[in-house]
Amino acid sequence: MPKLDLAYVRKQFPALTDDVAFLDNAGGSQIARPVFDRISEFMFSANVQLGATYSTSVAASRKVADGRAALATLLNADRAEEVVMGATATQLFDQLAQALVQHWEPGDEVVVSNFDHEANIGPWRRLEQRGIIVKTWELPIGEHRPGPESLAPLLGPKTRLVAMTHCSNIFGSINDVRAVADLVHDHGAMICVDGVAYAPHRAIDVKALDADFYGFSVYKTYGPHHAALYGKYHLLRHKAGNLNHYFYGEDRVPNKLEPGNPNYELAYSCVGVIEYLEGLAAAHGINAKGREAVEVAFNMIADHEAALCERMLAYLRRRDDVTIVGDPSSDRDARVPTISFVIEGQSSREIVEAVDPSGVGIRFGDFHSKRLVQALDLGDPDGVIRVSAVHYNTFNEIDRLIERLESLRKKVS
């Protein structure tokens, strides 16, 4: 696999400059140029309501359908109708919960974790108001990657769904979704996966995972402020109720789960994400289109990100006063370059604020994984320091951060 051409990559992201190093990408990535181009194209040529018979409306409908198909390609879904679009993953998980509960009964059970982003916990917990019993899958103390063995005792004949994350936005650990999915399906239940922290780093494959539902944020995956939720078609059709107007039948998949319609221009711009990945493959001498390009591009991305991860983790491992929160290794199969840590005797807030003037953007907090950070009991009310790189980041940017952290260490000592 060729080495990633960073000069090419960075030219595709107009916001990137040498002045600011964006190392807060887990909160949202920069947007690739083809995505912006598609937004402009839609706004200037097809900015009308869908569903009419005149040519501009027909073209607009086709463009939105193309955007949905692009998301299906990213997810490796069988059909575009398996993709529900919305503003955020948080919104889509909540809509899914409200749709599924229409077919459940009081006393049915859902399992949520204490190690996920709240987006895939809160919507299910709120179903307690509808008589649904919610059980908590807790991460064993000292571990950063959950396994099916700790989930198994919580499953039973009334379990309807298990919610989990593909990758922790605190630990950076990649979880074995397929192993959990197999266990969940053996008990006749469904699995809903939060892929937000995974999607910017690896090619999603909902079929390989056997995920029933899978959500991610396009705006963290080099696209616009938009999100997608995959659902197996037969589940969306027969297990999810209608959230749209009363005259939308339950056969209107996926529109029954998109009240008010998705944003048209942002939907179409998802085509630009695929175009970026295809261009990335071509720039490295690989003639690939569609799903093949997605897999090729993310394979190159993973190699570069693992090297960035090792540069940062190697520095943190050398410091006796640092606790790495999660896997201390840079194994590309085990983690993504979302790195959290705390520094003994120092406030995470104060460290990050002291880094800010150097032009390196990092962050502190719990990142809406509040239950996890509270359970870790790290002793800092400001949570963890998080450095989150993606493939357009450089070794020089990591080194700039290391130099600043080292200068702060010397001041304290």
Image (tube, rainbow, N blue to C red):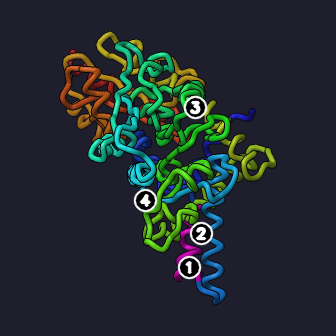
First along the sequence among labels 1 and 4: 1
Residue 221: say if magenta.
Answer: no
Q: Residues within 10 Å of mark 3 (few under 14, many from 20)?
A: some
Task: State the separation of the CA atoms marked 1 and 4.
Answer: 18 Å
The residue that disc 3 covers is: 185
Q: Which disc number belongs to residue 158?
A: none
Task: State the separation of the CA atoms marked 1 and 3.
Answer: 38 Å
Residue 403 visible in image: no
First along the sequence among labels 1 and 3: 1
Residue 169 visible in image: yes
The residue that disc 4 covers is: 87
Which amino acid type is marked by label 2?
Val
Check whether the beta carbons of the residues at disc 1 and disc 2 lie within 8 A of each other: yes
Q: Residue furthest top?
A: 320
Check whether the beta carbons of the residues at disc 3 and disc 4 lie within 8 A of each other: no
Q: Nearer the viewer, residue 400 or 70?
A: 70
Quadrant in the picture for residue 253 = bottom right
Q: Quadrant of the C terminus?
A: top left
The residue that disc 2 covers is: 64
Task: State the separation of the CA atoms marked 1 and 2.
Answer: 9 Å
Task: State the separation of the CA atoms marked 4 and 2.
Answer: 15 Å
Vertical order, 143 against 203 (above or below): above
Which amino acid type is marked by label 1?
Leu
The residue that disc 1 covers is: 50
